[in-house]
Image (tube, rainbow, N blue to C red):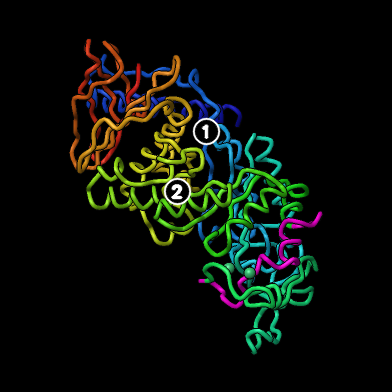
Amino acid sequence: MIKISRLRKNQLRNKFLFIVIIFLIAMACTNNEEAPEGTISKGQDLSIYLTDKGVMMQGFYWDVEPRFEWWNTIADKTKNWSDIGVDKLWLPPVSKGQSGGFSMGYDPSDYFDLGEFNQHGTIKTRFGSKEDLLKLIESAHNNNIDVIADIVMGHNSGGGSEFNSYRNKQTFTLFNPSNGNASGLFNRGFEDFHPNSIHASDEEALFFAEQDLCHLQENVQNWFWKNDNSIAKYYKNTIGFDGWRFDYVKSFSPQFVKSWMDEVGGWTVGEFYDGNADLVRQWVLNSGAKAFDFPNLFQMRDAFQQNNLRILQTGDMLWKSNPDDAVTFVANHDTDREPVIQNNYKLLAYAFILTHPGYPCVFYSDYENTAFKTQLEDLILINRTLATGDLKVLFADADEYIAQRSGTGSNPGMIIYINRSSSEQSREIKTNWISKSLHDYTNNIRTGLTTDSNGTSKLQAPANGYTVWSLQ
Ligand code: ZN
Ligand code: ZN
């Protein structure tokens, strides 16, 4: 028996070695086709240029699966995310929503039920139990990742029915232990919603108009941020959140985000859903928070869809005026359902945001997409190393966009070349690098280039692709 099995083992090993050899030969042949031997360029180990920059991971997509297991699913990924340069993890709203085990958290009912009370048909939230959440946060912290809570402050859902004297009818505005608020904390009634005795309405109430919270009411302010056991303080001091992402901030005054931040601090970004950069800048000014760069998202969409990359140079975007306030992104849980940037332009858009100013947010479904993963890892590394210093657009036309980051000190910076056309393109560009060898740090073009004594080189970018050139 022993003999046979040893023989079989040897056979298997030989078979394995044979496959490996065939594979290596095949690899060598492919490489030879792409670039004749001797011209494949090798870059530097970029870790020598590491800055303190990181990226945010949006740690969910719409209707994540499997239900009740999400916190555990992503806890296992925090080590990998940390290794590639993720320094913030944005979670979906953690509290129980009206649709219980199906809720993505944007229909908040009980802000203090993080998967521990039996209501709306479930104890766990769609994402898991409170214990699972605490373990996830611990695992993120052990990997030096800050955890960002998604706060839905505009409206509520899932309360009981009561007679609302301001509307002269029944409204679902009653929140107490027997009506969608099992925790018994932040009990609410119609006086806490619009209209009420002190306030008729606030900003936009597009969703759930009858359950639009009034943040001027003392009860609402106390439970959101003022009390010692307010939502803000409980999430920060007890649960361990480090910062905040405020949902749909157009639906209430920016002063309330400011009040929250004044009370508990923490890195904060708001979802001011608008392509008008002036309006987003105004909100940033009034709230003191950072904002998602929706103007940048919509300008990228136009540039790629309309085949006019000049828009990348000329378009008004938050990061151009407020680089430290802008959180740039290509996709999120909403665009997931209704794409803004089409899939075939996504990597080009990531190449843009990961080489330009602003703090980039990477969407879970994009990074965990095997077709994108390696390329996003390369771009994130470029973002943390070479993508530094002043930005200068060197060329832009319908289907090409070339821009340079100057670098700082010994960091040589980089040149990004985005090519939206369906054929490889090249263009003579004057760089800051005199008589140097260049390497494409995205590895999309495998042959190196050189600059002449004027710093000029004919840079290349593949069809519907991009390159990032820097010193070899
Ligand atoms: Zn109000
Ligand atoms: Zn409102």
* Label 2, residues with CA under 10 Å away: few <14, some 14-19, many ≥20: many
Q: Residues within 10 Å of mark 1 (few under 14, many from 20)?
A: some
Q: Is residue 428 left or right of residue 198?
A: left
User: Does ligand 2 reach within 8 Å of label 2's beta carbon?
Assistant: no
Q: In which quarter of the image is the N terminus?
A: top right
At mark 1, the secondary structure is helix
Classify 439 as above or below 256: above
Give x and y (percent) for residue 122.
70, 68
* Numbered circles on residues, count: 2
Looking at the picture, does residue 92 appear above or below residue 451?
A: below
How far is the residue under mark 1 from the one under mark 2? Answer: 23 Å
Q: Nearer the viewer, mark 1 or mark 2?
A: 2
Contact (Cβ within 8 Å) of mark 1 with mark 2? no
Q: Is residue 238 magenta?
A: no
Residue flagged by tag 2: what amino acid is it?
A: Asp
Whichever of callouts 1 and 2 sits on the residue coming sooner in the sequence is 1
In this orientation, does residue 100 appear? no
Q: Name the residue under label 2.
A: 293
Image point 42% across, 26% down: which residue? 389
Q: Nearer the viewer, residue 253 or 430?
A: 253
Quadrant where the C terminus lies? top left
Residue 21: image location, x then y, percent: 37, 24
Q: Does the image show residue 157? A: yes
- Residue 162 in percent (x, y) is at 71, 84
Position of 286 compared to 185: left or right? left
Residue 212 falls inside the magenta stretch: yes
What type is the residue that disc 1 sits on? Ile
Query: Residue, x 30% and y 23% (percent of image)?
Result: 28
Q: Give the range drawn in magenta.
A: 206-230
- Local SS, label 2: loop
Q: Point out which mark residue 84 bears.
A: 1
